[in-house]
Amino acid sequence: MPILEVNDITSGYGDVQILWGAALKLEPGLMTCLVGANGVGKTTLLRTVMGQLRPWSGNVRFEGHDISRLPAYKRAERGLVLVPEGRQLFGDMSVLENLEMGATNRRGRPHLKRNLERVFAMFPRLQDRLTQKANTMSGGEQQMLAVGRGIMAEPTLLLIDELSLGLAPVLVLQLFKNLQQLKALGITIMLVEQNVQMSLAVSDYGYVLAQGRTELEGAAATLMRDDHVRAAYLGL
Amino acid sequence: MDFLLASLVDGLLIGSVYGLAAMGLTLIWGVMRVTNLAHGAFIALGMFGVYGLFNGGFNPYVGLFLVAGCGLLVGIGIYYVALHRVINAPQLSTLLATFAVNMIILGVGTTLFSTSPRTIDFSLGSFSLGPITVQNTRLLAALASGAITGVLYLFLYRTRPGKYIRAVSSNRAAAELMGISSTHILALSFGLGALLAATAGGLIATFFPFTILSGDTYQLKSFVIGVMGGLGNPFGALIGGLILGLLEGLIPVVMPTTWVPVIEFLLFVIILLVRPNGILGAKR
């Protein structure tokens, strides 16, 4: 059974329709990427999956249950966790407090200690800066903290929006390696990225979103060889 | 010189209570981005709460605890009734909603209590320290304000719901993603703001006469203090309160008392022009 099913979602803001029939099926244990150019609706799709936007039609099923009407704050409790675009940290709270806030839901709280150790093992730099305010850290450190905060929520599915945006390539590679570690722990991951080449390279499966519709899907390795993908997104 | 010193001490004592009142306003603004125009009404309700309990045989300081508890509950109730459905609307909507609450409370209050001044017939005496005479009710009010500020600090920085309030204040959408129900936290914040206002009102009532309309004066002071200390910064509010109290103590020494509000609001405008984020400069 897919862990997340997005069935023909249409959605948007006010009168402006952004999604025109997006569909996904994520298999548990895999790393999937959703790629597409800027402005095709990737973030809108994530906002709809997380309940920050209501779908106009279609539905979202998580672990077999229709969650389309579930309020946003109840989704983290089920193990559906988003690392949002632009990090969205609690800027005037400390690094430790940001991590604690990740573990506020009923699901993450009992595992606070274990997950804290996991985060520190993955990002030792955060451990050195526990009392520092989040908004005083560098972009890379903030991204580590955003991912760390997501891990604290004890996710079964971790959605990550634009992990690589604005970061040095060497750091992005490091973060992608960290995601492989998370996958090894059994966490299903969906990367949502403009950086098509890098995300296809680390993922098992991929979806291409264009004009609010899922245009193409397939094994990541297959998509990398697809002529259309190569021409439109990889510039080859 | 002695007179100056006495005014200074008195100003500081009363100023700390102003700070407490402003803290309620600034907490609500900081967390909810709501300008609470019912703040003065909450202060007046606190005054009448302590007054009523005193006449019912309670010590005013015992009554204060009850008033604080009721303030919290009333604030939470008002949030759900009047604010919840407009919380995401443009700020004018929440401003008008709180204005409506203010008019309702003042209207009902005027009918029930009339607008004739009341006093709580209660005294703890006073003590003299050299040339200064301090009324014990004022000293106690200042100590209570300091203690409540400390408790608020501990609540916001050391407890789970306090941290949720700071998280929602910092980034409401992200807090929701982490599993925090922002609705509950916003209601709690509004309740706390009402609690602080009612408590400040209750303390003021132990040494100043008041009517149901008295809250307005303190609401205006709270705005001046909030802007001085940086809206959204509870601890700046206490400092701002002390500064305002000092001014109120010292201005009458050099010019007629009627000039006090003129100077206060002149200061308000100047600070808005020069340091729009407050003297303490909360960055937002």
Image (tube, coloured by chain):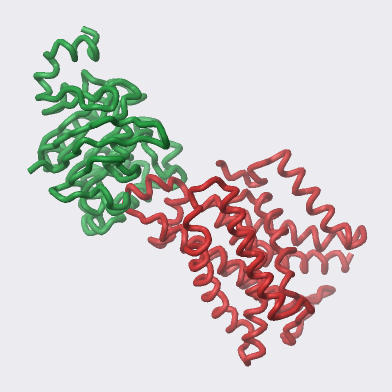
Chain letter for the green part: A
Residue occupying image coordinates x 21% and y 18%: A197
Instruction: Tell me the quarter of the picture where residue A1 sits.
Output: top left
Q: Nearer the viewer, residue B129 or A93?
A: A93
Q: Is residue A86 left or right of residue B81?
A: left
Q: Is residue B188 left or right of residue B106?
A: left
Instruction: Tell me the quarter of the picture where residue A23 sits.
Output: top left
Give the x, y percent position of residue B67. Answer: 57, 77
Depicted B231 relative to depicted A26: above or below: below
Q: Which of B95 and B278 is in front in this view?
A: B95
Residue occupying image coordinates x 14% and y 36%: A25
Q: Which of B215 and B104 is in front in this view?
A: B104
Q: Is residue B148 visible?
A: yes
Looking at this rendering, what residue extends furthest in the top direction?
A236
Residue occupying image coordinates x 39% and y 39%: A88
Image quadrant containing the C terminus of chain A: top left
Give the x, y percent position of residue A84. Answer: 33, 37
Q: Which of B191 and A50 is in front in this view?
A: A50
Give the x, y percent position of residue B55. Answer: 67, 89
Give the x, y percent position of residue B58. Answer: 61, 89
